[in-house]
Image (cartoon, coloured by chain):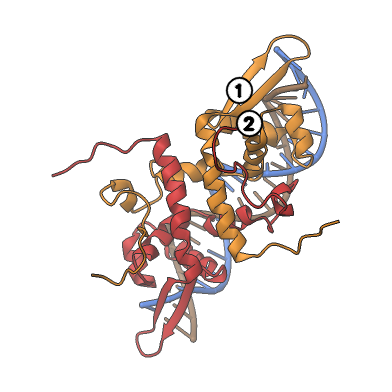
Chain colours: A red, B orange, C brown, D blue
Amino acid sequence: MTHQTVGHPVLPGLPDDPRAHAAEPTSSCPVEITLAVLHGRWTTLVIREFLKGDHTFTELSRALPALSDKVLSDRLAHLTETGVLDRRRRSGWPPRVHYRLTPQGRRLGPVLQALWDWGAQQQPPPPSQTP
Amino acid sequence: MTHQTVGHPVLPGLPDDPRAHAAEPTSSCPVEITLAVLHGRWTTLVIREFLKGDHTFTELSRALPALSDKVLSDRLAHLTETGVLDRRRRSGWPPRVHYRLTPQGRRLGPVLQALWDWGAQQQPPPPSQTP
DNA sequence: CTGAATCCCTGCCGATACTG
DNA sequence: CAGTATCGGCAGGGATTCAG
């Protein structure tokens, strides 16, 4: 019938969703919402660490040594505000704060996977160095 | 065997891919590659327009009226450099340049869909205004 | 018609120092 | 331990102007 030969829709979103036809960048667009959550250097790496399990501030700092305290603090606050992380203070001394992914945060796994898959096809993996 | 009850992997990439364990943001990480392509205001909207079909510079300018010529030019150059768009000059007067998605560019459809899906669950769509 | 050049302004990121 | 306060550098984006 048309030039389209594949079986999946090429456009994101339901066809009658007005947000799929926005004429300018708007924070109500679902794509923008997700990109805003992932926005900023280190953000995806932090999420990746949480996909492995929950962490405290210091544990994360050790997992990503080149990430400064200030930016780590910024990222944790941002991801907590956006509902990706759950922040939990444990009483006692020394003070410890545990972070973990919320159910919404866990749903970012497939999103990162989609981003990974596209990028991986752009640049094939380096030869595996099996010792 | 473990605490994991779902059937899909939570981590992006093959487990033995060294890029899945990077300790800092690096341009060789597939996730970073994709985010670099999508980076910048207006970029996803431009890609969306191309998922509908190919366009000339002016057609795009009309589809996204609030997008300035300079930024549109930047976006087209960036997406062409990264292999998402194919640039084709048609001889004659007035000069016209047609852009269209490459096969790699078309593969961004599912990526935008994944971004849309996550964002849509964060903020349900507004009530449809059926006239 | 399709851009490229320039200028200014803003916002992010890193480094450093400090606090409950 | 887990942050906040402050500062400076730099890149992104918009407006305007000019060119092939």
Task: Write the residue at 39% across / 65% down.
Answer: A50
Residue A42 visible in the shown view: no
Which residue ends up furthest to the top in the rendered image?
Answer: B92
Residue A96 visible in the shown view: yes
Protein chain holding label 2:
B
Q: Specify the label residue B76 is tagged with.
A: 2
Upstream in sequence: badge 1 or badge 2: 2
- Quick one: label 2, few (<14), some, or many (20+) residues within 10 Å? many
Which residue ends up furthest to the right in the rendered image?
Answer: B131
- Percent across and percent down for residue D7 are 57, 59
- Percent across and percent down for residue A108 are 47, 60
Instruction: Report the quarter where the N terminus of chain B lies.
Output: bottom left
Kindly identify which residue carries mark 1. Answer: B87
Protein chain holding label 1:
B
Instruction: Report the quarter where the C terminus of chain B lies.
Output: bottom right
Q: Secondary structure at mark 2?
A: helix
- Percent across and percent down for residue A18 are 74, 53
Above or below, comparing residue A89 to residue B71 in the picture: below
- Percent across and percent down for residue B28 are 38, 41
Above or below, comparing residue B11 to residue B54 in the picture: below
- Mark 1 in CB contact with mark 2 (< 8 angstroms): yes
Which residue ends up furthest to the bottom in the rendered image?
Answer: A92
Q: Secondary structure at mark 1?
A: strand
Q: Quadrant of residue B30?
A: top left
Q: Are labels 1 and 2 assigned to the same chain?
A: yes
Is A1 on the left or on the right of D7, as rendered? Answer: right
Above or below, comparing residue C13 to residue A11 in the picture: below
Is D19 on the left or on the right of A37, as rendered? Answer: right
Real-space CA distance between mark 1 and mark 2, rounded to the nearest whole angstrom: 9 Å
- Quick one: label 1, few (<14), some, or many (20+) residues within 10 Å? some
